[in-house]
Image: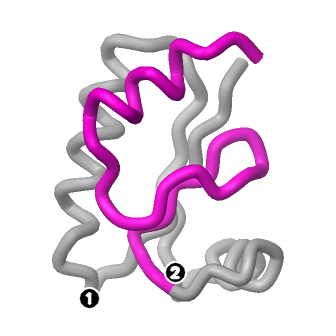
Amino acid sequence: MVKVTLVTAQWCHFCPTAKKLWRELKEKFNFEYAEVDYDSPEGEKLIEKFSIVSVPTTIIDDEIVFVGVPDKDKASKTLEKPI
């Protein structure tokens, strides 16, 4: 199953839009979804592992796929691709 992790921050003005997008797509597609706060211990691990410098950042199956708020059509097409 595809795993989507959205790295966000409380101070990020674009993160609520990204959260809304992925939550809507979660209703349409079957994938694991997690939101991780940039300032949390888990967030710090992801920042180090992926060299994240901007939020929101979307990680899909252990690869950064989107930085910023993705276009809904592009995000949908990413989820439709076979793994």
- The picture places residue 53, in percent across and down from the top left corner, at 55, 87
Element at badge 1? loop
> Visible in this render: residue 6?
no
Magenta-drawn segment: 54-83
Instruction: Say whether disc 1 or disc 2 marks the residue closer to the N-terminus.
Output: 1
Q: Residue at x 30, y 81 (%)?
A: 10
- The picture places residue 32, in percent across and down from the top left corner, at 59, 29
Residue type of the residue flagged with mark 2: Tyr
> Visible in this render: residue 41?
yes
Does the stretch in magenta take in 66? yes
**Left or right of 51 on screen, residue 9:** left
User: Foreground: 70 or 21?
Assistant: 70
Q: Residue at x 74, y 40 (%)?
A: 61
Q: Residue at x 29, y 51 (%)?
A: 19
Residue to which mark 1 is pinned: 11
Which of the 4 image quadrants contains residue 26?
A: top left
Which of the 4 image quadrants contains residue 76?
A: top left
Element at badge 2? loop
User: Foreground: 64 or 12?
Assistant: 64
Residue 38 circle label: 2
Residue type of the residue flagged with mark 1: Trp
Q: Residue at x 36, y 65 (%)?
A: 68
- The picture places residue 57, in percent across and down from the top left corner, at 49, 65
Quarter of the figure with the N terminus: top right
